[in-house]
């Protein structure tokens, strides 16, 4: 079918440099002995920063080798962009190293409907939006205003391109994989790397091949494919792995359907998901005004760049026959509890749950494509013709202004509103818990959503709300029935007038016949804006949510009598057992302080266990003044040490800092004066984040030494100066002085590269960047 399109736009900044990428891939192929490559390998390896250095011994072992990568673009959402930008500002650069965009989507609360919700959020979050907008203007970042839509949908509509590598500041980033690229969700520290042009370190993922046969039919949708796969793989099955789909079952699926599948790869923990370039991706690019990208991709595809080589080796292959796939409903509370629709009614009965649905929610970044919305409208039309309205609240979150406006023009919105739907703002809303739902507070109830996540309390903050994931069409059909046990494939709905009504399988339209309409263009940024260096960054002096970052000082220099050794460090505490980034910097109510380091640091290690005594959030200040008590909270003692100008160290257990790339977990200890952490072992990403903030991470050579160091002891590095002066010095001895004066040495080893030593010397990676600019 031919479809009208948006006017063709200038695609210079969004077309991947295919010739350059393919050249680099040729070099790497030679180094790798010309072995066949998967598509994901081609994309990753063609973005390696320095192939000779990374591939020193000529090998890349998937699951082992660390790659240094240069992505082409970065996108950030409004909640986490704050600290990323504050850090970027402290690097002193005048523009970002790669094109970047900011998307205001997470901070808009759903209360009553699109317009009033948007207005309210503009008032409550004004200082954050003002800051983000001014920083975007200063550094030439595309700023997508509140109301423009959800980050992943906008990336798909505007920036994604086959073969591209992109980092996005959020876990459902892989959505853009629907356009045959690798989009990888990263934490704040990684976003700062991209903004500053620092190569990004990623362990070469394993590649799982998902072979698709047959064709989806009836009520089955791409959402059901990923719900089914989540059931097979579980929430951990994709960890450290890329899901690469291939086979005849890929070809007929819409680009936006593939995006839904890629989006929810995050639910099985996958690094990302991708697909070979298809004609439907081409049509989507053209329909969204990106014909030049499509032409460039056609040529790259003709050279074999946008699909796996024949005989490419996968670490595992999963085979799925789409023709036999039925709709699935996953949950509650976990996305991998998959139940085929035909068995869901009996599952509900077995569990003894009330056979009642309390709300149906469709849309979000996962499922608000034109195809989703027209399929849903088809069901709504059928039901309306039978005189039905939805039995429960039915909320729809369009993924972008473009989708919303196109729905409105094509009367999809009218149809949905006619049967009782409330269309919310183009934002995350209930998907991220921004849903004011007082009427069900504390009540046991069940909701069905077409979103991607369903852990407890995710949507309405009520732990008693059972939240199930399904396709938008299943959610819609169930909203008309009001019963969890309803199966629209086989069951009918009784009509008030007598008789009954049965849905026909939904029919949607992949792309709008009249093309997409952009809607209210006032929400959109100017494409590829030039930096305006004179722009003043807007931060209110009394702000509780935003604070400029003061660069951390270097630990070396005249003030340090130990020269290039770290100054003497006091041990703050010995942390016992599991200590994730969430223990180090808790989320929840603290999220509002993400842009205010002083305020958020009050949560430092508040859920960590002190190995001396076994209590949580308890630390000892052995040098306390007479007016203070010896025992305080962990941030309390850290603050006292900072006030006394005493730099400090932590002693920690195994896998310290596991869980996430949350940069606050490294920023906060540094902010209070932390200078060194000695661990039984570190989680790699957090270890690198500590180095970026100028904290020295060291590993006990003998893990038993962990117990020899206690709070209040004094530590001195021996050998760091030699290392900083270029000597090959794998071991750093630590001289421990106990509080009774007894001394001994403990050997530790470091993992500092020569670049990372420069960060340490400068006080942080950003200081190092700044010193090179000045
Ligand atoms: Fe937003 Fe939910 Fe997607 S929070 S980005 S709509 S996963």
Image (spheres, rainbow, N blue to C red):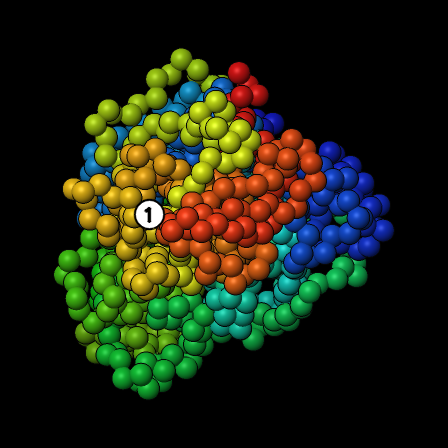
Q: Is residue 535 visible?
A: yes
Q: Position of residue 608 (x, y in %)?
A: 35, 57
Q: Is residue 169 positioned above or below 240 on the image?
A: above
Q: Position of residue 716 (x, y in %)?
A: 49, 42
Q: Is residue 115 visible?
A: no
The image quarter containing residue 321 is bottom right
Number of dots carrying numbers: 1
**Is the CB–ligand 1 distance for label 1 below 8 Å?**
no
Q: Is residue 404 positioned above or below 465 on the image?
A: above
Q: Is residue 394 positioned above or below 346 on the image?
A: above
Q: Is residue 392 positioned above or below 282 on the image?
A: below
Q: Nearer the viewer, residue 724 or 658?
A: 724
The image quarter containing residue 68 is top right
Outermost residue on the front side: it is: 741
| Residue at screen point 82% across, 46% down | 31
Q: Secondary structure at mark 1?
A: loop
Q: Position of residue 288 (x, y in %)?
A: 52, 38
Q: Residues within 10 Å of mark 1 (few under 14, many from 20)?
A: many
Q: Nearer the viewer, residue 773 or 645?
A: 645
| Residue at screen point 45% across, 77% down | 340
Q: Which residue is mark 1?
A: 604
The image quarter containing residue 720 is top right
| Residue at screen point 50% across, 54% down | 679
Q: Nearer the viewer, residue 279 or 609?
A: 609
Outermost residue on the top side: it is: 534
| Residue at screen point 48% across, 22% down | 558
Q: Position of residue 614 (x, y in %)?
A: 32, 64
């Amino acid at each position: 079918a031919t479809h009208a399109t948006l006017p063709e736009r200038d695609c210079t900044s969004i077309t991947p440099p295919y010739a350059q990428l393919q050249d680099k891939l040729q070099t790497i192929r030679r180094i790798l002995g010309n072995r066949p490559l998967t598509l994901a390998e081609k994309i990753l390896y063609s973005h390696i920063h320095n192939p000779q250095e990374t591939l020193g011994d000529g090998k890349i072992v998937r699951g082992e080798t660390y790659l240094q990568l240069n992505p082409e673009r970065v996108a950030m959402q409004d909640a986490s962009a704050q600290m990323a930008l504050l850090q970027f500002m402290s690097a002193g650069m005048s523009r970002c190293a790669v094109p970047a965009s900011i998307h205001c989507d997470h901070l808009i609360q759903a209360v009553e409907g699109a317009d009033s919700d948007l207005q309210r959020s503009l008032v409550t979050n004004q200082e954050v939006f003002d800051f983000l907008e001014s920083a975007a203007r200063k550094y030439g970042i595309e700023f997508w205003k509140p109301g423009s839509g959800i980050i992943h949908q906008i990336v798909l509509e505007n920036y994604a391109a086959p073969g591209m590598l992109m980092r996005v500041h959020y876990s459902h980033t892989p959505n853009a994989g629907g356009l045959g690229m690798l989009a990888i969700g990263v934490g704040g520290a990684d976003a700062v790397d991209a903004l500053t042009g620092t190569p990004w370190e990623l362990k070469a993922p394993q590649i799982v091949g998902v072979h698709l046969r047959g064709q989806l039919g009836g009520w089955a949708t791409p959402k059901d494919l990923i719900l089914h796969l989540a059931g097979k793989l579980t929430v951990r099955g994709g960890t450290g792995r890329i899901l690469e789909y291939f086979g005849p079952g890929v070809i007929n699926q819409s680009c936006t359907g593939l995006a839904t599948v890629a989006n929810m790869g995050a639910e099985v923990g996958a690094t990302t998901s991708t697909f070979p370039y298809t004609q439907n991706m081409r049509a989507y690019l053209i329909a969204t005004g990106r014909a030049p990208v499509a032409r460039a991709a056609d040529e790259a595809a003709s050279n074999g760049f946008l699909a796996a080589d024949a005989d490419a080796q996968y670490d595992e292959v999963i085979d799925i026959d789409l023709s036999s796939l039925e709709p699935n409903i996953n949950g509650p509370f976990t996305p991998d509890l998959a139940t085929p629709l035909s068995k869901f009614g009996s599952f509900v009965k077995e569990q003894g749950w009330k056979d009642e649905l309390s709300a149906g929610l469709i849309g979000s970044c996962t499922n608000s494509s034109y195809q989703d919305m027209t399929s849903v409208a088809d069901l709504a039309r059928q039901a309306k013709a039978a005189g039905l309205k939805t039995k429960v609240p039915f909320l729809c979150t369009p993924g972008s202004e473009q989708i919303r406006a196109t729905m409105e023009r094509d009367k999809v919105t009218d149809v949905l509103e006619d049967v009782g739907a409330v269309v919310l703002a183009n934002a995350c809303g209930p998907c991220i818990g921004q849903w004011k739902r007082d009427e069900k507070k504390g009540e046991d109830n069940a909701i069905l959503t077409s979103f991607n996540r369903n852990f407890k309390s995710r949507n309405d903050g009520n732990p008693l709300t059972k939240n199930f994931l399904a396709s938008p069409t299943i959610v819609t059909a169930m909203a008309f029935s009001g019963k969890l046990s309803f199966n629209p494939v086989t069951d009918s709905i009784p009509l008030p007038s007598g008789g009954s009504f049965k849905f026909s399988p939904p029919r949607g339209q992949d792309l709008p016949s009249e093309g997409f309409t952009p809607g209210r263009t006032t929400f959109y940024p100017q494409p590829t804006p030039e930096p305006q260096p004179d722009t003043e960054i807007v931060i209110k002096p009394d702000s509780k949510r935003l604070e400029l970052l003061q660069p951390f000082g270097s630990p070396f220099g005249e003030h340090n009598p130990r020269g290039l050794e770290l100054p003497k460090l006091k041990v703050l505490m010995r942390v016992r057992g599991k200590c994730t980034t969430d223990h180090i910097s808790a989320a929840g109510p603290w999220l509002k302080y993400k842009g205010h380091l002083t305020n958020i640091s009050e949560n430092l290690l508040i859920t960590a266990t002190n190995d001396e005594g076994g209590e949580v959030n308890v630390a000892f200040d052995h040098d306390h003044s007479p007016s203070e008590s010896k025992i305080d909270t962990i941030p309390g003692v850290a603050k006292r040490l900072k006030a006394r100008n005493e730099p400090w160290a932590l002693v920690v257990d195994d896998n310290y800092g596991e869980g996430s790339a949350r940069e606050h977990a490294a920023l906060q200890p540094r902010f209070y004066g932390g200078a060194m952490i000695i661990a039984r072992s570190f989680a790699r990403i957090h270890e690198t984040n500590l180095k970026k903030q100028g904290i020295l991470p060291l590993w006990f050579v003998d893990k038993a030494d962990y117990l020899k160091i206690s709070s209040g002891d004094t530590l001195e590095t021996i050998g760091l100066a030699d290392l900083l002066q270029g000597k090959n010095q794998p071991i750093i001895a630590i001289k421990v002085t106990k509080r009774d004066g007894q001394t001994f040495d403990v050997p530790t080893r470091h993992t500092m590269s020569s670049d990372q030593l420069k960060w340490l010397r400068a006080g942080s990676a950003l200081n190092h960047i700044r010193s090179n600019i000045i």
